[in-house]
Image: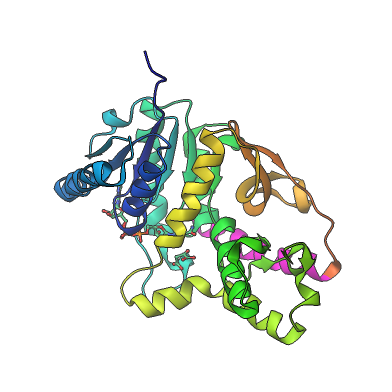
Amino acid sequence: MGIKRRKISVIGSGFTGATTALMLAQKELGDVVLVDIPDMEDPTKGKALDMAEAAPVQGFDAAVQGTSDYEDTQGSDLVIITAGIARKPGMSRDDLVNTNAKIMKTVTKDIVKYSPDTTIVVLTNPVDAMTYTVYKESGLPKERVIGQSGVLDTARFRAFVAEELNLSVKDITGFVLGGHGDDMVPMIRYSYAGGIPLEKLISKERLDEIVARTRTGGGEIVNLLGNGSAYYAPAASLTVMAEAILKDQRRVIPSIAYLEGEYGYSDIYLGVPTILGGNGIEEIIELDLTAEEKSQLDKSADSVKNVLRILD
Ligand SMILES: NC(=O)C1=CN([C@@H]2O[C@H](COP(=O)(O)OP(=O)(O)OC[C@H]3O[C@@H](n4cnc5c(N)ncnc54)[C@H](O)[C@@H]3O)[C@@H](O)[C@H]2O)C=CC1
Ligand SMILES: O=C([O-])CC(=O)C(=O)O
C-alpha cells in the first residue's frame, strides 16, 4: 500500500480556481476536486479533464476532478474558496460584499457538511470580510479558517523592488500588514534585499512610489484586463499557503487571521504575520509598530470593520 494522497477541494472553477487547481496538481500537493455551480458543471469537468491530460506531459501524479456535487469533496484535507464575483474596472473590492457573502454562506455549509475537520483558505473578495463570514458559518476553530492577501501583496511589492534594483526576486523579502485594500500597510522596515535593509538601497521617494503601486496592484491588473481580476499571482499565493499547511512546513507567511487582542484588535480578520503549518495558523507573530505604522494599520482595520458592518 502506498501513502494515501491528500485531497484538496477548490470551490469556484473560474480564473483563480482553475489556475490554482493546476498549480496544486503540478506540485503534487494532492488530488484536486474542482467545484462550481450546476450550471457550470460541464465547463468545470472540461477544465479538470484538460488538466488531467497535462499530467502525463508534465509528469505529475495528481488526479483532477470537476464536479458540482459536494459529496465529491468528502474528507478534504484542505478547501480553497474562490467562488464568487470579481470586480471590473471602476469597482472596489468592497462592492462585491453582498453578493459574495451570500455565496460564502452557501458554499461553507456544503463544505463542512462533507469535511467537518478541514482547513479552509479563502480568496474571495472582499477577502478579510469573506474570511470572517466563512469562519462564523463554518463553526471551525479560528486557526483553521484563513484568508489569502499577504502573500500576494508581498509578492507584488517584491516584484516591483526586484525590478527597481535589477536583482533576483529570490533575494527580496518583505511583508504587508492589514486588510486587502488600498490602505494595506507594506512594512518597509522589515523588508530586505539579501539581508540589506531596502532603505539603504532605494530612496525614500522611490520607496513611497513602490508602496503606492503595491497598494493599488490589484486595481492595476483589473484595469489592464478589462473584464476580471488577477489570477496567476493569486493562484501561486494560494499554492504556497496550501503547501505550508499540507506539508506542515511552519513557514512564516502573512495570512488573514482571526484576532483576539493581537495588535490591539478583536473579533476581526486581518492580515498579520503568521506561522502556517499542519494546524493552519499555528501562531500569530506580533511585531512592535511605530506610531505611524500603527495609525496606518488602524486605518486599514477601520476599512475592514466598515465592510463587516454592512454584513451586520
Ligand atoms: N484575496 C485575493 O488576493 C484575491 C481575491 N480574488 C477574488 O476571488 C474571487 C474569484 O475570482 P475569479 O476566479 O477571477 O472569478 P471568476 O468569475 O473567474 O470565477 C468565479 C467562479 O465562482 C463560481 N461560483 C459562483 N457562485 C458559486 C457557488 N455558489 N458555488 C461554487 N462556485 C460558484 C462562478 O461560477 C465562477 O466560475 C473574486 O471575488 C475575486 O475578487 C481574486 C484575486 C486575488
Ligand atoms: O484586485 C482584485 O479585485 C483582485 C485582488 O484582490 C487582487 O488582485 O489583489
The colouring scheme, among rainbow, by chain, secondary structure or one colour, is rainbow
| Relative horizontal placement of residue 217, taking residue 229 as reference (left or right) | right
Residue 126 at x, y percent in the picture: 49, 60
Q: Is the magenta stretch mostly helix, strand or loop?
A: helix
Q: Where, quadrant-wise, is the N terminus in this rendering?
A: top left
Count of all numbered marks drawn on residues in the image: 0
Q: Residue at x 52, y 73 (%)?
A: 217
Residue 109, how many percent across, how many down?
A: 38, 35
Q: Residue at x 81, y 71 (%)?
A: 292
**Residue 117 shown in magenta:** no
Q: Residue drawn 31% across and 41% down?
A: 59
Whether 201 is drawn above or below 134: the answer is below
Along the viewing direction, whichever of 23 and 227 lies nearer the viewer: 23
Residue 307 lies within the magenta run:
yes
Is residue 152 visible in the rendered image? The answer is: yes
Q: What stretch is highlighted in magenta?
A: 292-312
Q: Which residue lies furthest to the left in this view?
A: 42
Q: Where is residue 238 in the image (x, y as percent from the top left)?
A: 48, 50
Q: Residue furthest bottom?
A: 205
Seen in the image, is 279 located left or right of residue 80?
right
Q: Residue at x 20, y 48 (%)?
A: 50
Residue 294 higher or lower than 105, as above or below:
below
Q: Is residue 303 left or right of residue 28?
A: right
